[in-house]
Each structure stands twice: as structure tokens, then as C-alpha cells.
Image (cartoon, rainbow, N blue to C red):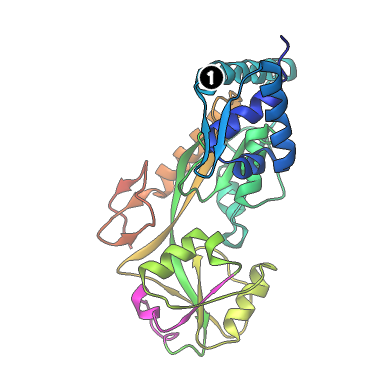
Amino acid sequence: MDLDVAQIRAFVRVAEELHFGRAARTLAISQQALSKRIARLESLLGIELFQRGGNGVRLTDAGQRFLPPARQTLAAADAAVAAAIGKNHPLRVDVWGHLYAPMRTLAQVAGRAGELVLGHGRDVRSVTAALLHGDIDAAFGRVHPPLHPGLAHRLVRLEPVDAVLSADHPLAAQPALRPDQLSDSVLWAPGALNQLDFLHQFANRFDIGARATSVNLGLAHFLAEVAEEPRRFSLLPADVPLPDIPGLRSVPLVDPTPLYAWSLLWRTGNGHPGLKSLTAACAAQAGQSRWLEYDPARDWLPEPPVNASPGRQH
């Protein structure tokens, strides 16, 4: 019996997600195409692999038996492709979280990480699909739960975040602000907050009730919108260079200082040697620049940090 690797990959992805829609998105195919692959595989095997009902999708007994060897088959297929192509191609890296300018951090380690090919940047869903497909080798951005089981990540940098606001904002002249002092202001976001986890959690944690969204047409356009309205504010890492926009102020946040977490993300089992070079370069720069220092008494993170060290100075 000859099995189709694309059908096996579809099965494994549905088994991991237990949701046809989410699985289809990670494979970058339509849900209809995914369902057809599963149906053909079940027809070939002569068994049902999933039970579908009002309570969602779950594996049948046969599906549970099929899952471990199916994963082994995919690993072997991926290893065969890697062996044929070779591991001498440059490491393909993409980013997300563009408003926070991830390339400026990645640029600080790129020279020590071997040959890199950088993508144009996408959103986290597209990056996840590209990693799982093998279209890219690594990605750089903010990771938050739940993480796909086929991916691994390493924390690279914890970055202090400032408030950016109009010079006419009532708090613009303050040398520093506590996040809760912004509770009467309007959080200006470059998109729907349910797709911007950091801003969403910040607003909930510090009782920012007034929230409004814009369209992400780039940092300069977004900050010009912030500057034109006295009650608006948004958040940016402290060392992001601000465009020359009249009437814009950047004020440090303290007690606590919000930290934006950058991580390196890759597909489990990817053996590209450039991954080791890149993670080593990130670790060396983090130690040199104190990127991973965290003090829970002074700092705020939406999720508990991993690989961080105590005692950051403000």
C-alpha cells in the first residue's frame, strides 16, 4: 500500500489541532482540500481515523494507533528531503510584529549567525504555516500560548516598553508614568486587539477601558494618528527610533515596566546548522546587553518568562 505523504501530513495536523479549520490554516490550504485528503486516506486504509460530531473532532482507536508511525513517516520524509537538498543553503528567517521593528534586534546578531536570507515579514499565522511547511527555517517575533506542538522557541530579548502619546496629552510632561495612570486614556492599536495579544493583555491588566483601532500602514502613519488626538496613547519598545513627527512624546513606564518578549521560533526536528549559530549569537548578545534580565517586583510580562535572569536595572 503506497501512502501519500501530503495525506499523512494532513492527518497528523488534524490529530494535533483536533480542528479542521485550524489545521487547514497551518497547512496553508482550504478546509475543503484538507477534508478531501483525510477522506482519501481513510478510503485507502479502509478505516475511519476521526470521529466528527457536535462535540468536535477526536481520534478513533485506529487513528490513535496510526498517529505515532504517521509522525515517524513524516520525520523520515522530511529527513530525506533535507538530505537531498543538503544543509548548505542559507538559513531562511522571517519576522512578525512589524510595528515594533523586529529587524533592529535581529540585525544585532545577524553578523555572527552565518549566512541568512531574510523574508519580507508576515503575520504570526503565516509564519507558523511557513515554518511547518518548511518554506522558512526560523522566525523572530513575540510568541504567546498556545504554541503549535510542531514548533519550538527560545526567548531572545525582554524589551522595556514606553508610552507614546500626543504632546497635548495631560500626562505628556511627566518624566515617567505608571501604566495605571493611563486608565482614562484611549489605547490606539494598529489592528483588532484580539489579534494583538500584548496590547490586549496590557489593556486588561491595567484597566484601559477606552480602546480604538487603526490600520497598520507603517510606524510613521500610526504614530501621526497618535499625535493628532490628545487622549490617545500606544506602546513601543524604548529603543525603537521614533519618526520625526511634531507633537509626539515618548514617556517611560515604571512600577511596573511592561516588557515585550522577542523569541526565536523554528520547526521541531529542523537540523539546519545555521539554527545553532543563530541561537548561539542571540544568547551571546543577550548576555552582553543584558537582554533577558527580569525583576517581577518591577516588571510586567503577560506570560512568565523562560530563560530570563533576575535583577534588571531601570
Question: Position of 179 compared to 210: left or right?
Answer: left
Image quarter hosting the C terminus:
bottom left
Magenta-drawn stretch contains 249: no
Q: Is residue 219 above or below residue 3?
A: below
**Residue 87 at what x, y percent from top left?**
67, 21
Residue 156 spot, x, y in % from top left: 47, 44
Residue at far left of view: 297
Q: Would you say residue 175 sits in the magenta stretch?
A: yes
Q: Name the quarter where the N terminus is drawn.
A: top right
- The answer to whether residue 114 is left or right of residue 59 is right
In which quadrant of the rendered view does residue 275 lie? top right
Residue 29 seen: no
User: In which image quadrant can residue 247 be found?
Assistant: bottom right
Magenta segment boundaries in residue numbering:
171-189
130 and 89: which is toward the camera: 130
SS for tag 1?
Answer: helix
Q: Residue furthest front?
A: 54
The reply to whether residue 2 is in sight is: yes
Q: Residue at x 60, y 19 (%)?
A: 75
Residue 133, image x, y percentages: 67, 33
* Viewer-closest of 282 and 190: 190
Q: Is residue 23 left or right of residue 298?
A: right
**Local crowd at mark 1 within 10 Å, few (<14), some, or many (≥20)?**
few
Residue at image position (28%, 62%) is 298
Give the residue at mark 1.
62
- The residue lying at 59 percent from left, 34 percent from top is 14
